[in-house]
Amino acid sequence: MLTYKVATVGAGPAGYFTAQAFQKAQKDDVSFVIDMIERLPTPWGLVRSGVAPDHPKIKTVSKVFENTAKEPNFSLFANVELGKNISSKDLRDQYDVVVLATGTSKGRKLRIPGEGLKNSLSAAQFVP
C-alpha cells in the first residue's frame, strides 16, 4: 500500500475540507497521513471566532471538522507558525504533499465601486 504524508497549513474550514477530501480519496492501495499545522492555539478559524453566537446553524460544520480530526491518520499541531517555527523547505523535505490553506491577517483592495467610502472595511479589519 502506498502511504503519502500530507501537510495542511491552516486549520480553518479550507484546511479541514482539504483533509476530509484526502481521507475520502483513500482506497485499498492508497492512504494518506495528514498533519495539520495551525498558527493559532485553536483550530477552525472563523467558524470558531468569527461566527456570531446567534448563528448556531453555521457552527454545526464544526461536527464535520471533529469527525475529520477523529480519524487515526490525522494530527493537529497548533501554535506552529510557518516561517517562524517551521520553514516551507522543512515541509517540502518531510511531506509528499503540502497544502497552504491559510487565511490572511491583512485586508486587500479589491478595486470595486464604493470600496473607499467611509466605514467600508475589509473582513480582516471587521471580524476581530
Image: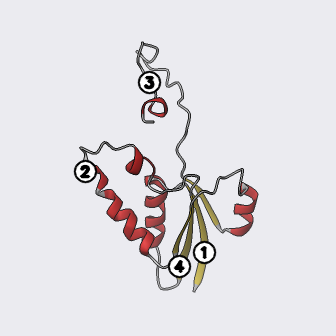
**Of the residues under marks 1 and 4, which one precedes in the sequence?**
1
**Of the residues under marks 1 and 3, which one precedes in the sequence?**
1
4 w.r.t. 20: above or below: below
Q: Amino acid at mark 4?
A: Ser
Q: Amino acid at mark 1?
A: Tyr
Regarding mark 1 in the picture, which secondary structure is present there?
strand
Q: CA distance from mark 1 to mark 3?
A: 41 Å
Q: Where is residue 18 drawn, in percent x and y?
A: 48, 60
Using a 10 Å C-alpha cutoff, classify the residue at mark 2 as few (fewer than 14 neighbours), some (14 to 19) or many (20 or more). few
Regarding mark 3 in the picture, which secondary structure is present there?
loop
Marks 1/4 in contact by CB < 8 Å: the verdict is yes
The answer to which of 121 and 91 lies nearer the viewer is: 121
Name the disc covering residue 31, or none.
Answer: 4
Regarding mark 4 in the picture, which secondary structure is present there?
strand
Name the disc covering residue 56, or none.
Answer: 2
Q: CA distance from mark 1 to mark 4?
A: 6 Å
What residue is shown at x 42% (from left), y 13% (from top)?
118
Q: CA distance from mark 2 to mark 1?
A: 36 Å
Marks 3/2 in contact by CB < 8 Å: the verdict is no
Name the disc covering residue 121, or none.
Answer: 3
Regarding mark 2 in the picture, which secondary structure is present there?
helix
Q: Which residue is mark 1?
A: 4
What residue is shown at x 75% (from left), y 58% (from top)?
89
Q: CA distance from mark 4 to mark 3?
A: 43 Å
What residue is shown at x 46% (from left), y 28% (from top)?
122
Quadrant in the rendering for residue 33: bottom right
**Of the residues under marks 2 and 1, which one precedes in the sequence?**
1
Name the disc covering residue 107, or none.
Answer: none
Left-right relation of 86 to 68: right
Left-right relation of 26 to 33: left
Using a 10 Å C-alpha cutoff, classify the residue at mark 3 as few (fewer than 14 neighbours), some (14 to 19) or many (20 or more). some
